[in-house]
Every structure is written in C-alpha cells, then in structure tokens.
Image: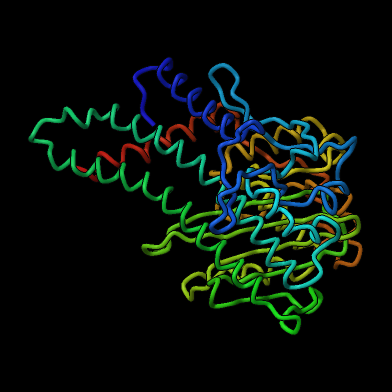
Amino acid sequence: MHFKDDKERLKYNNEGFKLKNDYFSFKNNKMGCLYESCTGKAVNSHSISKKSSLISICENNEVLACKSIRNKEELTFDFKRVGINEATTFKGFCGEHEKLFEKLDKEKIGDLKDLLLQVYRCIGFACYNEGIMRALEKQQKERLKNYYNIDKLENRNSDLQKFLNETIEQASANKVSGFHRLRKVMAKYMELVNSLSDLDNRKIADIDRFENESINHIIRFKRVREQIPVALLNNFSYFYGERNCDIFFIAIPYENCTDIIMVIERDPGINCEEYWEYSTESDIRTLNLVETIMMMSEFWFIKPSVINSMSKERQEIIKNDIWFASERKHFEPYDMSIFDEVRKKLISECDDRTISMELDKINNIPYRENLEFRKEKMHKEMNRQYTQIMAKGR
C-alpha cells in the first residue's frame, strides 16, 4: 500500500487495527447466528471445545496465543495469555444452536457425525473471520481510490480509471462472495448431518477419509497417539482457475491424543491428498505438519509451558517467523522444533536418520537474516505487488 508519508500510513494502520479489535471484541453484539435461517443473536462460541480439549492444555485456566500488537508505528507479534473462556471463541451461534455441539463439549470425536459437526463449527469460525476481512477490504478500497485519485483522472487515462475501478471492486466483491460461499457450505454440512442414519454414522476408528458430493469436500482425519498441546484453526483461501477454494487445517488436543483434520475441495485439479498422505504417514511427520501449519498463521493456542521453557532466542524466532510467513513457500516444513518433549517421545521408534534430523531441530538454532533487512524485503514486496496494478492498467 502506498502512502504520502509515515503519518498517513500510521493513521491508516491504526484505523484498520481498531476495526479488527472492535469486530473481535466480546462486546460486539451485532452478529447473528450462522445456522441457516436462524435470526437469533450469536453468543461467544468455542470453535474447539473448552471442556473436552482446551482444559487439557491450559495452565491456571490460560493458554498462550501469538497476537499481533500495534506499538506506536510498528506492528509486531508477541505471546499473550488468553483465558480458556475466550480462546478459540467467535460470535457464531445462538444459545439454542450451541446445543448442536454438546457431545463434542463432553468428549473427543467419536464418530462421523461428531467429525462433521466439528468441521461445521470450524467453517463457521472461518465465515466469521471473513466478516472482518470485508470491513478491512472496504477501508482498503477507499484508500486505493484516494491514492490514485480515481475520480479525478483525466480523460486520456480513462482506460486506467476503468481498470482501477474494476480491480478495486473485484477485490471487495471477493470478500463478500467468500462470506456467502462459506454460509452455503455450512448449510450443506447441516443437511448432511441431519440426514445421517445410525447405519451411516461410522465410528471414528474406521475413518481416515470421507467425501460426499453434497458438501463437495474431502475430509482427512488422523489421530496422533500423543498430545500435541496446541489448538489450531487455520484456513487458506486461494484461487484455482476462476474459483475461490479453501483448505482447512484443524488440530484438537485431548488429554492423551490429538486429532488432526484437513478439509479440501473435491476437485481433480486440487491435489493435496498426496501431501496429506506423506505428512501423516507417521506420528513424527504429523507433528512436523502441525508445526508447519502453525507458522503459516496466528490462529492457534498453545500450552504456556511449551513457550515458557524455550530460550528467548527461540521465542523471538517463532514470533518473527509468523510475521514474515510470506518468506517461506506454502507448506514448507518448519526448520525448528516447537514441541521438544513430544518430539522426543515420537522419535523413540524412528530410524537413526530420522532421529538425527529431528534432534537437530531441538539442539540447533536456525539462521535468520537481520530483522530490519527482513522488514525492508517485506515492504518492497508489498509495494511491488501494489505497483503492478498501475503497470497492468496502462
């Protein structure tokens, strides 16, 4: 994004930060229930259960989250304590429709219906997050119009004016369509849940893959035999052809195991299943998958002692790597251990080569470029992407 000066940039960033904070506030009572055709007001819903999951990784009823913080003129990330009454919550469902998840709030996923309801719950979380993106897109839309003086362009630049208007309107429309697209997906999931017979409702031990034409999704499931003490909810939207597609990753820790879920579109052109098969072939690879997905986004909540037991240097690397996540390729394996104790347990049955590779992640600090240099690279890349608008319009 281009700005006339630092003062204008700071004003824009602070406005966006306030929009985000107001939207995610517990006091935001403007959200309606996401259940199809329900007109009730949404309450604070947990996307991952407090009673069956978060309670197993909390300390003093708190978990740690890596939160973005605006400090004067700079955005940074830091670890903040979050109560389990708040962690993973969103304004999703009214009190009546929260009852859909009563079983999930008492015990771990036990059958296909539980699995579908958990995915439904997490798609609701993604849908809720699309709401703030729409608000931020509106702010960015106005900023771009002002920067390029679209309404004041001379006639000789009419093609550029038309191009910029179309580009900005399309960017805004994508967020609106994303919200409604996810609402439609949620409705399909609920139709499927309601149509499940007792015969169809298989036990989770018999499920590692599920697909259904009505929801147009493939769901992959893996249960790790150790607790990986992080609750993770990440979804990635990307364009495939002319379609906006989603991949959802979910990690749900319990007292003595962890459920890992991946949800992808049913489309021959979207092939993430080979990646899933390789990444979940063993429990140690699945741990690597969880750490990789964690470092692609900040939507996770971790047992405090995992972070607190790390050196300050390793903590800083994690915080900065989330900030500069765009430096790495999508799904590039993370090169430093986050869960040392879990890793040590899982490698006990591995071959010598794997043991050596995994211990290196614990014992060695990976090299990172200077922080200021990384910032400069990131800002240059952001400016390059925005100036492409001008180049395409000429």
Residue at horizontal 74 percent and vertical 78 percent from the top: 201
- Residue 247 rendering spot, x and y as whole percentages: 57, 60
Which image quadrant for residue 64? top right
Q: Residue shown at 11%/30% (left/top)? A: 154
Position of 235 with respect to 147 (left or right) is right
Q: Quadrant of the C terminus?
A: top left
- The quadrant the N terminus occupies is top left
* Total count of labels: 0
- Where residue 218 appears, as percent x and y from the top left, is 60, 72
Q: Does residue 261 sit above or below 14 in this rendering?
A: below
Q: Nearer the viewer, residue 69 or 359?
A: 69
Residue 353 visible in the snapshot: no
Residue placed farthest to the bottom in the image?
A: 199
Q: Residue at x 68, y 75 (%)?
A: 209
Q: Position of residue 62 (x, y in %)?
A: 83, 36
Q: Is residue 366 above or below residue 19?
A: below
Query: What colouring does the structure picture have?
Result: rainbow
- Relative placement, left or right, of 290 versus 256 is left
| Looking at the image, residue 58 lies above or below residue 271 | above
Residue 254 appears in which quarter of the rendering?
bottom right
- In this rendering, would 125 be left or right of 56? left
Pick whichever, 100 or 178, lies toward us: 100
Task: Find residue 72 and report its image quarter.
Answer: top right
* Residue at screen point 80% across, 35% down: 83
Q: Position of residue 60 (x, y in %)?
A: 90, 35
Closer to the camera in the image, 265 or 216:
216
Question: Would residue 14 be visible to someone looking at this image?
Answer: yes
Side of 19 where 220 appears, left or right: right
